[in-house]
Amino acid sequence: MPKPLNLPFDPIERAAQRWEQTWGPASAMRVATSIMRAQQILLARYDELLKPHGLTFARYEVLVLLRFSRFGALPLGRIGERLMVHPTSVTNSIDRLERAGFVERRPNPRDGRGTLAAITESGLAVVEAATSDLMAADFGLECLGEKSRDDVVAGLTQLRRDAGDFTD
């Protein structure tokens, strides 16, 4: 759990008031800053929940992606594309997951130079246990009702669509 700020005021709202006095409308700044703070809060919660499993959220995402893949294995480049992270981050995550026994590297049979990351039985077990813990904690979103969750997803989906993450 992230350390609570315990401020007697909302720092984002305070910044927005000053923003408006200095530069004008602050609605976009409020949203952007709120998203960034929410990310910090959620990542801290996830990392706390996943630590007993020997995982960070980044490594958990890799295991989930491999768990969802058709054959339990994907090329490292595809993992980076799907998780939208730099190849160095993928290599680091795979290295750590491999040391923990949760994935293994295999030659890519379709590409003699490529490497696949494959989830192991231990990886499958840990991703199931970790997912159970995240679901029991409602992914740290217990304060949001279904309507609020749907509204957040709708807004962020539009942002991602406009950024070119996907086309309909």
Image: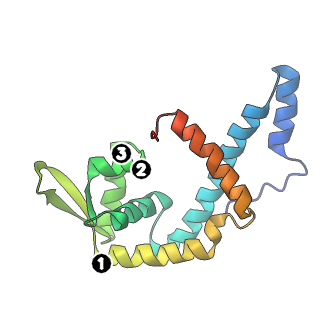
Q: Does residue 119 appear anywhere in the picture?
A: yes
Dot 1 alpha-carbon crowd within 10 angstroms: few under 14, some 14 to 19, many 20 or more: few
Amino acid tagged 1: Glu
Dot 2 alpha-carbon crowd within 10 angstroms: few under 14, some 14 to 19, many 20 or more: few
Query: Residue at point 67% right, 50% down?
Result: 152
Marks 2 and 3 close (CB-CB < 8 Å): yes
Query: Residue at point 62% right, 51% down?
Result: 153
Query: Residue at point 32% right, 63% down?
Result: 69
- In the foreground, 102 or 69: 69
- In the foreground, 129 or 154: 154
Report the coloring of the rendering.
rainbow
Residue 137 position in % (x across, y down): 63, 73
Give the residue number, with chain letter if any, for mark 1. Answer: 121
Q: Does residue 3 appear anywhere in the picture?
A: no
Amino acid tagged 2: Leu
Measure the alpha-carbon separation of dots 2 and 1: 22 Å
Q: Element at badge 2?
A: helix
Give the residue number, with chain letter if any, for mark 2. Answer: 83
Give the residue number, with chain letter if any, for mark 3. Answer: 81
* Mark 2 or mark 1: whose residue is earlier in sequence: 2
Quarter of the picture containing the N terminus is bottom right
Marks 1 and 3 close (CB-CB < 8 Å): no
Left or right: residue 25 compared with residue 107: right
From the image, state whether disc 1 or disc 3 is nearer to you.
Answer: 3
